Amino acid sequence: MSAALCRAVLFLALVSFSLAIAVKTTKPRPLVLWHGLGDSHSSPGMLQFMDMIKDVHPGIFIHSVYIDPELDNDRKAGFYGNVDEQVAFVSEQLAEISELGDGFDAIGFSQGGQFLRAYVERHNSPPVNNLLTFGSQHMGISDIPVCGRFDILCQIARRATKGAVYGEWAQTNLVQAQYFRDPRNYGTYLEANRFLTSINNERADSRNATYVKNFASLNKLVLVLFSKDKTVVPPESSWFGSEAIPEDDAAGGPRQERLSDVVIIPMRLQPLYLEDWIGLRQLDERGDVVFETCEGEHMDIGDCWKGLVEKFAGGQM
């Protein structure tokens, strides 16, 4: 064998060895899930969804966020609790998981989406790469979702929330009250609400520049709206849309009656976007906000998730 041929064979062997090592050492980016209202971190549905993701991305590490390890208590925590404290608890939880140390992608279902956004804005250590939210209430809700006929826990929480939504107790103990944004009572909302006004930087005198920096650091923000959503009111909240605020309420004036024709303000016309209170405009102008629609009612996810998970989750580290 000539010297030139020996060198060529050696070179090819080294290249093959290097490629084999690269294949063995590369792995999918870890994934964090935050379930929605009425669910728990390891319910049969969540476990099934995690298994399907592992079929799409073999070898992926997945962590499902919990507020309480016990499933029934975790479900209750979706209705009752202080959301600010829950987000802080999850931040500590994620920081202790070594597999997440280099960052992760995240998927939030329904209210889990805005809670993950709160994590990004306030903590983001370890950092989120891509954030996908399915049917989330980024601009809050202007009505409380109707409960199932036999869902007593939901019915009790709904009555309590509607009864005194902006009272001190509701704003620190009823989860849905903490993202209830009434456009006909906007002045009271700004004064009383602690969670949504904070993560949306709505109060001019207390806007947090760290929220802007952290949120704009996302690689991609994927916003998924359900086409027949009757649970999220308005459904456009999933795309950072909201009902228009009557002029009197915008100025802190008297409460208005519900308008017969609801006017929806889309994301790019929101003051939050125009003045870039949270870094959303930076993301969008970079081309890193993705709008998607799943056909069906709230969380009727079908196969809609698969293409999004293939594209925006589980990328190589």
Image (cartoon, rainbow, N blue to C red):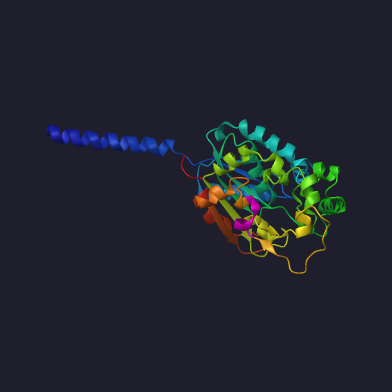
At 23% from the left and 33% from the top, the residue drawn is: 10
In the rendered structure, the answer to whether residue 200 lies left or right of residue 8 reads right
Report the label total: 0
In the rendered structure, the answer to whether residue 286 lies left or right of residue 209 reads left
What secondary structure prevails in the magenta region? helix
At 49% from the left and 42% from the top, the residue drawn is: 28
In the rendered structure, the answer to whether residue 192 lies left or right of residue 211 reads right
Expressed as whole percent of the image width and height from the top left, the position of residue 57 reads: 50, 47
Expressed as whole percent of the image width and height from the top left, the position of residue 101 reads: 55, 32
Expressed as whole percent of the image width and height from the top left, the position of residue 314 reads: 51, 45
Q: Is residue 187 magenta?
A: no
Q: Residue 269: name its quadrant.
A: bottom right
Q: Is residue 121 visible?
A: yes
Q: Is residue 298 visible?
A: no
Q: Residue furthest left?
A: 2
Q: Nearer the viewer, residue 46 or 109?
A: 109
Q: Residue furthest bottom?
A: 260
Q: Residue 115: name its quadrant.
A: top right
Expressed as whole percent of the image width and height from the top left, the position of residue 93 reads: 66, 33
Q: Is residue 270 magenta?
A: yes
- In which quadrant is the N terminus drawn? top left
In the rendered structure, the answer to whether residue 11 lies left or right of residue 240 reads left
Q: Which residues are the magenta region?
A: 266-272
